[in-house]
Amino acid sequence: MNAENRYSGKVLVAGATGRTGQWVVKRLLHYGVPVRVFCRDRDKAVSLFGESVESVSGVIQSAADIALAVKGCSAVISALGSGSYSGESSPAEVDRDGVMRLVDEASKAGVKHFALVSSLAVTRWYHPLNLFAGVLLKKWDAEEHVRKVFSGADRSFTIVRPGGLKDGEPLLHRLHVDTGDRLWSGWINRSDVAELLVLSLWVEKAKNKTFEVINESEENQQSLEPFYSMIPE
């Protein structure tokens, strides 16, 4: 598949230096899609991706920084994730406000597609993960904002709700996809989450979908694209 012919717009990756974000960049490069990374530490981005990958440094708390990063991009993939209970890396600052700010600036810049990493059990306020500063509640707020802003006729979104994230190469598992937040547990490779996000750029059945995904079994895959056809309506 020559994906470069199927999607030639530039994609901004937010949270690119995180473990899932790194895989998003790798898979975009694999398909020849033009990439720009938005990160706090440009030196770290260069060490991970090299000088050939365009990077814009800034913080997710700054609308001006985000506006500069997203200018000229036709899609955004957000792999943002909080890392502490409080402060600039908290769920409120990153998973909710940061993502919502990114959505707003992407909309202003004319971005056509927004893809987001969320989480399994995001609708369940009583889930133990919410003991981490209400992280699932914050992710739910961000999801709602994505759907509100990018549901227009000339825009689209894809929200992936993975189970627990593991390291490993992509395309080594058959996946189980579902909607309605009915899955309580499960695991998935970060690389496969990244693959699904990248495929959402050009797979029509990925448009305007919110879905959960976990590993079903070990089984080599030629592509993860067919799993978008298995998402319940």
Image: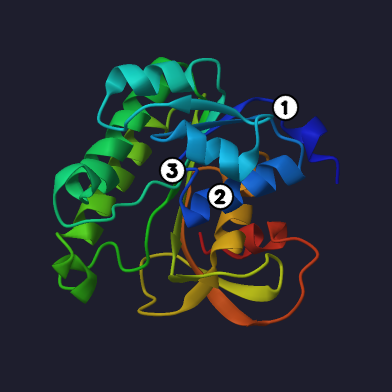
Q: Are marks 2 and 1 in contact (CB under 8 Å)?
A: no
Cα–Cα gap, marks 2 and 1: 20 Å
Q: Position of residue 63 (x, y in %)?
A: 29, 21
Residue lying at the far right of the rendered structure: 1
Q: Select label 1 or label 3 by which is in front.
A: 3
Residue 40 appears at what percent x and percent y?
38, 34
107 is higher (above) or lower (below) than 138? above
One can see residue 131 in this view: yes
Q: Earlier in the sequence, mark 2 or mark 1?
A: 1
Q: Kindly identify which residue carries mark 1.
A: 8
Give the CA separation, mark 1 to mark 3.
21 Å
Residue 145 located left or right of residue 173? left
Instruction: Answer above or below: position of 76 versus 210.
Output: above
> Label 2 belongs to which residue?
22
Is residue 114 in view? no
Quick one: 73 or 141, which is closer to the camera? Answer: 73
Category of crowding for the residue at label 1, using alpha-carbon neighbours closer than 10 angstroms: few (below 14), some (14–19), many (at least 20) = some
